């Protein structure tokens, strides 16, 4: 995908338009772990970027991050879905989205479309892919 198309896709994401309340995944019987929500979290789906692609990957990741930050302002309209009792998961969603965008940008720049691009498309569909089950299946809100 061209970089401009990738950035446009992120800009147009209608965050959480198809999502369920966060309590729907918090109250499940199966075991799962959160997908990364901060830059320093361990990447469960590492992206290998060759030396040739490093500069373009960094540039696209930086641009994508900025576009996503602006796009994520729309989340406030659906914030009620992210509150469970005294807990507000808004910052977790934003962190997860930003982590995903950076990793998908690296995949896109290096023509290695993988798991992060798949997860980004779930965000694009208005969901929150928030976790991963022990069997590798993505937990979707």
Image (cartoon, rainbow, N blue to C red):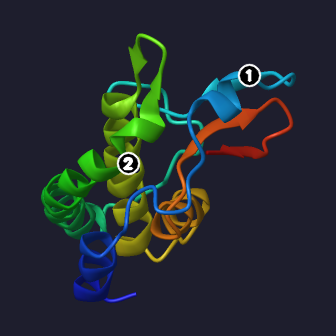
Q: Is residue 106 visible?
A: yes
Q: Secondary structure at mark 2?
A: helix
Frontmost residue, 78 versus 107 = 78
Q: CA distance from mark 1 to mark 2?
A: 22 Å
Residue underneath mark 1: 27
Residue 9 horizontal/vertical position (percent):
34, 78
Q: Is residue 110 left or right of residue 112?
A: left
Frontmost residue, 26 versus 42 = 26
Residue 32 horizontal/vertical position (percent):
73, 26
Choose mark 1 or mark 2, whichever is in front.
1
**Disc 2: CA contacts within 10 A as few (<14), some (14-19) or many (>=20):** many
Residue 125 horizontal/vertical position (percent):
53, 70
Q: Are marks 1 and 2 in contact (CB under 8 Å)?
A: no
The structure residue drawn at horizontal position 30% and vertical position 30%, both measured from the top left corner, is 91
Give the vertical position of 36 relative to 119 (above or below): above
The structure residue drawn at horizontal position 29% and vertical position 76%, both measured from the top left corner, is 12
Q: Is residue 78 left or right of residue 28?
A: left
Q: Is residue 106 left or right of residue 121?
A: left
The structure residue drawn at horizontal position 86% and vertical position 22%, both measured from the top left corner, is 29
Residue underneath mark 2: 97
Tell me the quadrant of the picture where the C terminus can be found: top right
Query: Residue lying farthest top?
Result: 86
The structure residue drawn at horizontal position 59% and vertical position 45%, both measured from the top left corner, is 45
Give the vertical position of 57 relative to 91 (above or below): below
Tell me the quadrant of the picture where the N terminus can be found: bottom left
Q: Secondary structure at mark 1?
A: loop
Give the vertical position of 19 relative to 135 (above or below): below
Frontmost residue, 46 versus 75 = 75
Quadrant in the rendering for residue 101: bottom left
Quadrant in the rendering for residue 80: top left
């Amino acid at each position: 995908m061209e970089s401009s198309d990738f950035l446009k896709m992120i800009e147009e994401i209608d965050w959480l338009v198809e999502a369920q309340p966060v309590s729907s995944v918090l109250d499940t019987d199966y075991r799962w772990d959160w997908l990364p929500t901060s830059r320093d979290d361990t990447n469960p789906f590492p992206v290998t970027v060759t030396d040739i692609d490093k500069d373009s990957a960094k540039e696209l990741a930086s641009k994508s991050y900025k576009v996503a930050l602006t796009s994520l302002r729309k989340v406030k309209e659906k914030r009620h879905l992210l509150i469970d009792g005294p807990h507000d998961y808004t910052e977790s969603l934003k962190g997860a989205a930003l982590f995903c965008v950076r990793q998908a940008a690296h995949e896109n720049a290096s023509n290695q479309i993988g798991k992060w691009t798949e997860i980004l498309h779930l965000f694009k569909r208005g969901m929150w892919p928030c976790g991963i089950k022990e069997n590798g299946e993505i937990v979707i809100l």
